[in-house]
Image (spheres, helix red, strand yellow):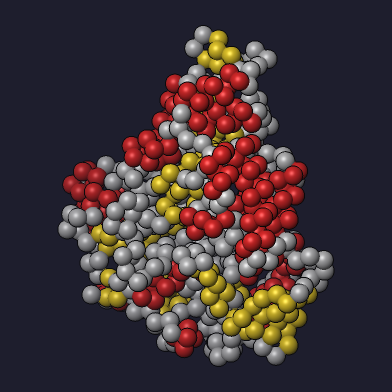
Amino acid sequence: MVSRRKMAIAIGVMVVTLVALVAASMGGASTKAARNHTLITGGKQWGTVNGYNVYNGQYATGAVGLVYETLMRYDPLTDKYIPWLATSAGFSGKTYTITVRSGIKWSDGSALTAADVAYTLNLGQYATASWHTLWAKTGGATASGDNVTMTFTGTPNYQEFQNAIWNIPIVQKAQWSAGVHSASDVTTFLADPTKVPIGTGPYTLDHSGTGDGTVKVEYSRKDSWWATSIGEPMPQPLVIDDLVNSSNNIALGLVIHGDEDLNNNYLPGITKLLSSGYGIVTYFSKPPYNLAANTAWLVPNTKRAPMNNASFRRALAYAINVNQVVVGDYGNLVQKADSTGLLSVWKKYINTSLTKKYGFKYSPSKAVSILKSAGFKKKGKWFVQPNGKSIKLGLIVPQGWSDWMTAINMMSADFRKVGINVTASYPANFFTLRNAGKFDLLIDNSAQISDTPWTYYNYMFNQPILSQQTFANFGRYTNNTAWGLSKALNAVPVHSTAAMNKVISKIQKITLTQMPLIPLWYNGVWAQMNNTVWTNWPAGASSRHYFPCMWNGYFQMTAIDTIANVKAK
């Protein structure tokens, strides 16, 4: 998951207190290698490192990408899959065949084999594995020579399976089979910062440098990396120190001073420092400064009135001045989202005739008109429900997420202007309330950029609705037609764009007319880099089009290319 904890920052105060902040934080820097051999990163790890179990979502920064690797990678900037540990992987009818690349070695010197890959995929037999439902439709993976095959019963979940293939880290059978004997082991084995994982990536965990995991995790470069044989540069950093965040204030101080080379926190006001002489750069030199990572949605709890009324949800959409948030809150660090909510990487799936007919834009008068047409009436200052009951709603985001806190203050003011009584707040137990459905309105951005919009629609419509919704459909929206279409999309091969669009257009008509979620803006891949020690960072104006990001899930997109291409000054 992407780390999104945020705190307010006063840039002027930070510059004044810079020296003290840096002095307080430099315990995280490596003392084993010279500074121009050590890449220092931060922004993902809040709190003590939780070990190297790559199947529980809480693993240490870099465990996937620097240590463990995946069969394929995916480049959202070009919409292409990249063969990685596998030279090829794809369907022929209902059989999925993987050809494992030869010549790859684990960090203990043994060879990666098809047996390792089959063992990893067969961990899906355990219900705790994220790909368990996929594995259940195959009967398991079989290794023969360099090939691994999985034969599906019934129609494969093409979209879901292809997405899983580039997101499942491959583990060493010898290490994992010694410690995994039950479903609980799948998510707890190696979930300990004192353990050393065995991987195929360019780095190994330096246990002596990591210590107890309260300050940083440290990786040391291997003498060789198989990927150089297919044209990937050997990374120059001999050591990578990823610091545990103590505060965004300290992170900003480190970036300004050049003592943190890459930071992936949301740091408001960072654009004011781009031409200040500190050597700070972002992916784009002008708005939106960062690549897009996900869509921020207004999530109405559809199990509560009046959020269960589609007309009311549409009125909410027209009432929000998103441009005010983009400029006044973010300083153009984000962009207003398309009415479909789909990221620009999925532009080919957006049905523009539908957005032209059903899309929305800021219009308080339209919001009022929709409410009146749907039977909502004004009683004094506020609208009441058609049955006469009052409307008094709460809009929540997590405590400390300063940009969202500012945004919902703006949005609640927008709602109140049109007569919808909404109050903003920032509960410390936000995620508990979200998962349990104990809210009226909230902002969420859990669905990240991926290789298929199926991941977004699965996030929107996933059923059944449980007492605890942990990863999808927090608004508890029930629409059997939409869920059926999402499953139909899942059954379309990933390269059949025309067939995908036929289904997606039907889904988009539902999202645009029923508004189960209201797209607001595209959150950025927050990334500020300092050129003082390391340079050659990804940049939109260069040929280096990679994600400069240490968040979970981004290494197997293109973040590993960032690490491989940075150069010491």
Residue appearing at x 53%, y 39% in the figure: 359
Say left or right for 217 vs 125: left
Location of residue 181 in the rendering, given as x and y in whole percent from the top left corner:
74, 70
**Residue 530 appears in the picture as rendered:** yes
**Residue 248 appears in the picture as rendered:** no
Location of residue 564 in the rendering, given as x and y in whole percent from the top left corner:
39, 76
Residue appearing at x 43%, y 37% in the figure: 322
Q: Nearer the viewer, residue 3 or 455?
A: 455
Depicted 483 relative to depicted 70: above or below: above
Location of residue 512 in the rendering, given as x and y in whole percent from the top left corner:
59, 40
Q: Nearer the viewer, residue 365 or 491?
A: 365
Location of residue 104 in the rendering, given as x and y in whole percent from the top left corner:
55, 87
**Residue at the top extreme?**
380
Q: Nearer the viewer, residue 70 or 493?
A: 493
Residue appearing at x 73%, y 77% in the figure: 92
Residue appearing at x 32%, y 58% in the figure: 284
Q: Nearer the viewer, residue 93 or 279?
A: 93
Say left or right for 69 vs 28: right
Say left or right for 164 vs 337: right
